Amino acid sequence: MKTCKLILLFFALSLMASCNNNKEDNTTDNTSYEVVDRNDIQRIEPPHWWVGFKSDSLQLLVHHIDIANYEPSVSNKSISIKNVSKGNNSNNYLFIDLDISKAKAGKFNIKFSNEEDELIATYSLEDRLKPAEDYIGFSSSDAIYLITPDRFVNGNEINDVPLGAEGQAFMLEKTIDRSNDYARHGGDIQGVINHIDYIKDMGFTAIWPQPMLTNDMYEGSYHGYAVTDLYQIDPRFGTLDEYKTLSKKLRENNMKLVMDQVANHCGLQHWWMKDLPFKDWVNHQDNFEYNIDNWDWKVTKRSNHRRTTNQDTYASQADKKGNNEGWFVATMPDLNQRNPYMAKYIIQNSIWWIETAQLGGIRQDTYPYPDKDFMSDWAGAIMTEYPNFSIVGEEWSYNPLLIGYWQEGAKNKDGYDSNLKSTMDFAMQQKVVDGIKEEESWDKGLVKIYEGLANDFHYPSPKDIMVFPDNHDMSRIFTQMDGDEANTKMALATYATMPRIVQMYYGTEILMNDFDKPGDHGLIRTDFPGGWQGDTVNAFTGEGLTDAQKEMQNFVKQLFNYRKNSKAIHDGKTVHFAPFAGTYFLYRTFEDETVVLILNKNEEPIAIDLNYQSEMGLKGKTLKNIITGESKLWGDVIELKEKGVTLLTTKL
Ligand code: CA
């Protein structure tokens, strides 16, 4: 053995393998056969993995012609194959369960053999970059900027229409067309990277870009929700390295990257739709016929979108299945999470992205559509690996009972525990709009906000719920407010001050709107001015913005920059007073910081007697206006000169 080691010291590394092979007791290298860097296999997913997870199992999906007729073995003695499964619908799949509990980081080979043939794939296990506890998810201390990446900034025109080796456009959508609201416009990851400073300067601490994974669909692929490869960044958005750079640069700025994920469905052109491994890989697979060459498919059953069937104790099985198993839309096959291989695939895919991109959170699309027991397992698996992480699930419901049902810790009658830290507050979104727009009466107007927040008693943790003035699926807040700037400011300040995580859609700060076709998705997701070469208006520099746009941009900047460091807003106690004479007062207090939100709907000047709010203990204190910077003594009366929001703080 000594001779052997000397040889190793002085000669080429290639000798190492033969030397090790001669060892009987291999303590320095536990390969049972030589590791070569080779890949004969078409696709293995996840493409690599890590050691050091709490879960010590790993399931590989192997996709290769006739692979079911091969026997796999691994080259590493510390890794064992626990189980090998074949699909019941295609011979081109193997699902290999590995026990990696004793494995160390490094490469190993998986050998696929049968009597006639041998194929080899090199697989890599890596060390994790940071402790699991250091993955800190978003919380009420965060303000999240939602971006439609195709529509924000075109930072790289070369990737607008990616070209193959022969100079041909290879994505199914072969052009960009900025005049078409439903076509690709060219925005990308580099564009976001180039403007992190702007987003940070506006006071935001996290970004949520709509999905950036490949959507190689024939049309309407710009929004990202029809994923056709769950392990690939869409080449029109950029590369995996660019995505990782985006995350890194955000972290360098103390900001988080929230990834938009979709467990419910994929895009019709997903690679596996041409060769489904199991007979139940997607729901309603029996009715599915598809000719990949001419974009011709038989429409299968659509979801009935009856989302209350998840909670309804009277719901029929037919309605439940109709919601959970129907396809969201005809071009988005409904994934069957009750198939254990699909379930494992989705969970591992989420973890792969958290670890690869060092994520600061996940936003999960269409939460009430997948199998809800699976969703609990999915969130549970992630939170077990990353105890300080955050996930927000989307359910578009105005009913606080449903919003509360999905939040971890809810005392649900059916015993359901979601493991989900955050849900979305469509209810308060609506209450704030109604509260500000409606004419005041006993049961209309500001009382909607007052009574809306009163529903917080129902939630396990109100401050972990995400509220928002607008998003990519609804009219811009300026449109919802009928173009009233004062009302828009009132709304923004209310969302940003209440005990919630807050999210705002890009461009809301410059009064982007959808007046021409209210609610039209393509229009809502308009290009951000200044994001494209030759734009005559540039919201990043202020060039060409109207005074009203500049004023709103400044308002948002003051509001969110204050919020960024406000313990009172992040974690403070909340007290509010029933609306009075067209006004509403909301207090947030943490130690010596008190923030007061005052909404005033009176067009004419009004003086409000503050003595009935004496329990807040502000009398005689000086308060600063967060937006204007002016300071005033809190006395017996406050004079409100015009309709709008007044946001005050004791922090001078
Ligand atoms: Ca581009």
Image: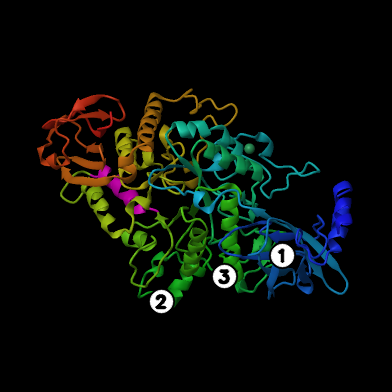
The front one of 589 and 362 is 589
Q: Which amino acid does label 2 sit on?
A: Ser
What quarter of the picture does the C terminus occupy? top left
Gap between marks 1 and 2, in whole Å? 38 Å
What quarter of the picture does the N terminus occupy? bottom right
Q: Quick check: 390 above or below 523?
A: below
Q: What residue type is labelled 3?
A: Asn
Percent coordinates x, y for residue 389 in the rendering = 47, 53
Regarding mark 3 in the picture, which secondary structure is present there? loop
The residue depicted at 56 percent of the width and 65 percent of the height is: 334
Q: Quick check: 51 above or below 526?
A: below
Instruction: Specify whether residue 534 is painted magenta.
Output: no
Numbered tag placed on residue 316 in the rendering: 2
The residue depicted at 35 percent of the width and 43 percent of the height is: 480
- Residue 542 visible, this angle: yes
On whether ligand 1 comes within 8 Å of the CB at mark 1, the answer is no
> To which residue does mark 3 refer?
283
Instruction: Specify whether residue 430 is painted magenta.
Output: yes
Task: Give the residues drawn in magenta, as a range.
Answer: 424-438
The residue depicted at 58 percent of the width and 31 percent of the height is: 532
Ligand 1 image position (quadrant)? top right
Query: Mark 2 touching mark 3, by CB under 8 A?
Result: no
Q: Earlier in the sequence, mark 3 or mark 1?
A: 1
Q: With 608 as the anchor, is 457 left or right in this view?
A: right
> To which residue does mark 1 refer?
62
